[in-house]
Amino acid sequence: MTNLKDVLHFYLGCDIRSIGGADLGQLVGVGLTQVIVCPKDKFDPRTTLMEYVKPILRRLSDMTEEEMNECGNMIYDFSGEPELNKWEWYNFEVCLAPLQFSWLVKKGFDLFGLIDSNQAVDAKTI
């Protein structure tokens, strides 16, 4: 199981909730045991212990067709070849190019099983 503290830095800029369910804002900094969260409506960074927060992420299975095509055609564009341009969300579980990995993380997709291990909140449930 992946530990949140080992991967949270990848999700800088994502929305964060407290473990109690309160919306805290966006993740703007990650330390060894603390995070810096800033409310969305104003610049007012706050520090809190990492153990008290959960990132709000999306499951790969919630990718739209448009997102699948964008990510899938990022390295080599298959959009002109209908028989090869058939992307499914599970195509992005393994063997990602660094550009695809970065794009998926920036879009807030859970690439580490954090939702299933209850270390992140499923964006679809909010």
Image: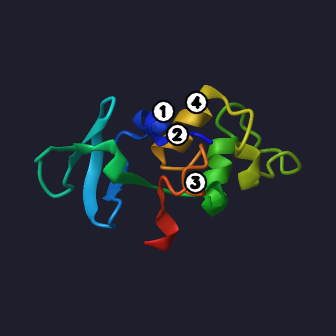
Q: Which residue is mark 4?
A: 99
Q: How far is disc 2 from disc 3 in space, using C-alphas?
A: 9 Å
In the picture, measured across the screen, residue 26 lies left or right of residue 73, that is: left
Q: Is residue 115 above or below residue 34?
A: below
Q: Nearer the viewer, mark 4 or mark 2?
A: 2
The amino acid type found where label 3 is placed reads Ser
Q: Secondary structure at mark 2?
A: loop
Q: Which residue is mark 1?
A: 6
Q: Secondary structure at mark 4?
A: helix
Mark 1 or mark 3, which is nearer the start of the sequence? 1
The amino acid type found where label 2 is placed reads Asn
Q: Nearer the viewer, mark 4 or mark 3?
A: 3
Q: Are marks 3 and 1 in contact (CB under 8 Å)?
A: no
In the picture, measured across the screen, residue 14 lies left or right of residue 125, that is: left
Q: Which residue is mark 3?
A: 117
Circle 2 residues within 10 Å: few <14, some 14–19, many ≥20: few
Q: Secondary structure at mark 3?
A: loop
